[in-house]
Image (tube, grey):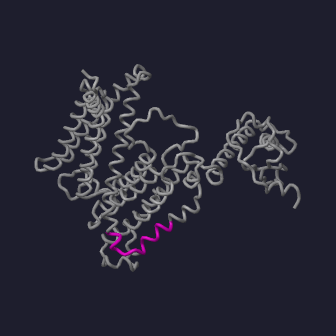
Amino acid sequence: MDKGHSHALRPRRCMCGEGRAAMPSRPRPPDLHTIQTNHESKKEGVRWTMTLGSATPETEERAVRGGGNGDGDGDGGGGGETARCVAVAVEEACCGCAQLVVGPPNPMMARYVYAFVFLATNMLAWTLRDFGHPVLAELRRLRGCQGASYCLGAEGVLRVSLGCFLFFFVMFASTARTRKTHDRRNSWHSEWWPAKIVLWMGFTVVPFFLPSVLIQLYGKVAHFGAGAFLVIQLVSVTRFIGWLNDCCRSEANLKRCHMQVQVVSIAAYVGSILGVVLMYVWYAPRPSCKLNILFITVTLFLVQLMAGVSLISKVKAGYLAPGLMGVYIVFLCWTAIRSEPHTEICNKKAEVATSADWVNIASFVIAVIVIVTATFATGIDSKCLQFKKAESEQPEDDDVPYGFGFFHFVFAMGAMYFAMLFVGWNANQTMEKWTIDVGWASTWVRVVNEWLAAIVYIWMVIAPIVWKGRQVGSSPECT
């Protein structure tokens, strides 16, 4: 092997992040070489060099002179500059992909890969539920269903969900309490993708060989896991709204954000009231719709209660937090009523949806995206369940950017959650195609989630006063 070929086979460190302006003038180290593919163009007589992962002065000069002849007599100025910019952009993209595969651990990029795995699992569960009956009917372990379509579809969803839960639970157990980036578990969380893909595929296949009794037992346990996911999610949302409110009301941002806060608060409050009015029109068109009237009226009461508690002189929570929470619980009430069976006479929008397939399909796609996004956003908020303020603890440079164990735990609970949505929180009912989270069980779960969200918010705004009063009352120095 000659010298040139031996150089081409040497491993090369990806030189990402270097300034573009300095690239033509700064020479590369002599021991770093580029994999080059040379192509002789007989028609133009120009020698082109395609560089992967590097741009040397010689190759950039060839790119600039690409518009002319082999001697560089052509102008090619604009085209050469564009070619150089494209080469640099390709270099940076290649370096980013290379760092994900063979570079140092990148936990920030890894979370998107896990989200994609979770999305793929959701799509697989939906496919088996709506279109997998012929395949599922051939499995010996599913013959206990006696060919019932709802049983086959529900069990298919539960088996896929069980595999997803096992995968993320193993990841949770193996990465819990990871604190520093130099920990080996950081490498396991952010790398080893071929091994983890094989692990995920194995956990996805194994549940299809389990008896139906175990799957039905998992379906009962999944109710509690999905409930835990909803609690974590609403605490995370409430905590984010509280953080945003405190940030806007801080001394540094109070004067600068005063007008914006007032506008957003008024818009949120008006939007929540408008949402209540529309729900009365759409879902309570006649006095006989007593249950929907009850849901909407309680929601209106909770909106007023949260606003009133926040404006108490001792609380002083401002206008922004109750306005955003009002929009949130109105949204939860709307999703609860939307989850009612389509045969319900009080649900006018359901009649319209059943008559247009594209509406069902669009709603289904949006719902799946919301599931994945909510799981992802909740998983990276590892501090949402930390009720103690650790103001004295400052993050260090080698701290992990988010809690790996909590991230995987949320995804494990999310696996149970999407299973309940696909079967309508009831494994014994028939789900129509392109539907998600439909049924009376789904309705009541979301209603309780709405009420619990309001209770959590009210407690979070009055808890400091309650604890402060207890501390003052127990202090011997208090007169």
**Residue range highlighted in magenta:** 201-216
- Residue furthest to the front in view is 476
Can residue 170 be spotted in the picture? yes
Can residue 130 be spotted in the picture? no
**In the depicted view, which residue is nearer to us: 20 or 191?**
191
**In the depicted view, which residue is nearer to us: 450 or 129?**
450
Locate residue 54 relative to residue 286 in the image: left or right: right
**In the rendered image, the vertical position of residue 434 relative to residue 456, given as above or below:** below
Residue 214 located within the stretch drawn in magenta: yes
Residue 202 located within the stretch drawn in magenta: yes
Q: Total of numbered circles in the picture?
A: 0
**In the depicted view, which residue is nearer to us: 73 or 282?**
282
Q: Kindly report the secondary structure that dominates the magenta region of the rendered protein.
A: helix
| Quadrant position of the N terminus in the picture | bottom right
Residue 467 in the image: state x and y as whole percent. 29, 33
- Residue furthest to the left in view is 287
Residue 119 in the image: state x and y as whole percent. 45, 56
**In the rendered image, the vertical position of residue 84 relative to residue 262, given as above or below:** below
Residue 52 in the image: state x and y as whole percent. 73, 50
Q: What residue lies at 27% left-to-right and 56% top-to-bottom?
A: 442
Residue 11 in the image: state x and y as whole percent. 75, 54
Locate residue 109 relative to residue 130 in the image: left or right: right
